[in-house]
Amino acid sequence: MAVSLQKGQKVSLQKGNEGLSKVLVGLGWDQAQAKKRGLFGALKSESQIDCDGSVIMLQENKLKSQDDIIYFGNLRHSSKSVIHNGDNLTGAGDGDDEQIMLSLNDIPEIYNRIVFVINIYQAQQRKQHFGMIQNAFIRIVDAKNNTEMYRYNLTDDYTNMTAMIFGEIYRHDGEWKFNAIGQGTNDLGLNELVKRYV
């Protein structure tokens, strides 16, 4: 049974699971239901919210190359150690909306952090933000047996936030760990978001 994590909690991926080599990182969210308003209340936009999940691979905690950004326009890292399974345009349906597969043993030693982020596509133009999203989560699955190891459900109020740093997998004392971050930002797209790591 998966361990439910709190914001800021850090856990080992390999303690008690030393043979772990491949993990699937699932990202999920749902569009919140529209709330009816009075005559003078604002009407919610009916347009779908398109969230884009991305991975930023860091060397010494810094982004050193554009090739280390894995997203819908670059689904596979050159090392083949991180593979994005593609863009979900609506977040509709149950389960993961986007998935990223990591081959931990194949991630080159130069990378010490793998950061998982989500931004709302054209958030400013569409007047959309994470306050209009519900049931957001990140989960870590042992890909060998499809067992969910950890799950972090984001429960903060992210009204007016247009991007999100969900969590990260990082190296510490020779093992891989996961950090549940859940930090909302006002970055308007992936290009702005990655500047945090330059």
Image: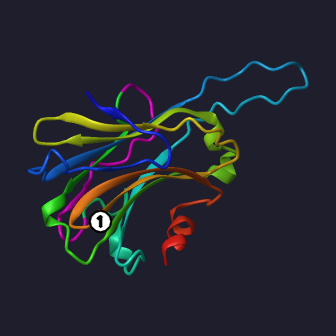
Above or below residue 183? Residue 190 is below
Rendered location of residue 80, percent (x, y):
17, 64
Magenta stretch containing residue 79, yes or no? yes
Rendered location of residue 9, percent (x, y):
44, 47
Kindly identify the amino acid type of the residue bearing the numbered disc 1: His
Above or below residue 111? Residue 156 is above
Magenta stretch containing residue 154, yes or no? no
- Kind of element beneath mark 1: strand
Write the residue at 54% across / 71% down. Answer: 196
Q: Which residue lies furthest to the bottom in this view?
A: 64
Specify the color scheme.
rainbow
Write the residue at 34% across / 52% down. Answer: 178
Above or below residue 36? Residue 87 is below
Q: On the image, which quarter does residue 91 sit in?
A: top left
Above or below residue 70? Residue 20 is above
Rendered location of residue 96, percent (x, y):
35, 35
Q: Which residue lies furthest to the right in this view?
A: 40
Residue 120 visible at all = no
Name the side, left or right, on which 104 lies relative to 118.
Answer: left
Name the side, left or right, on which 148 lies relative to 132.
Answer: left
Check disc 1: other Cα within 10 Å, few if <14, some if 14-19, many if 20+: few
Residue 10 visible at all = yes
Name the side, left or right, on which 3 lies relative to 51.
Answer: left
Q: Mark 1 points at which residue?
A: 172
- Quarter placement of the N terminus: top left
Q: Bounds of the magenta span?
A: 77-94
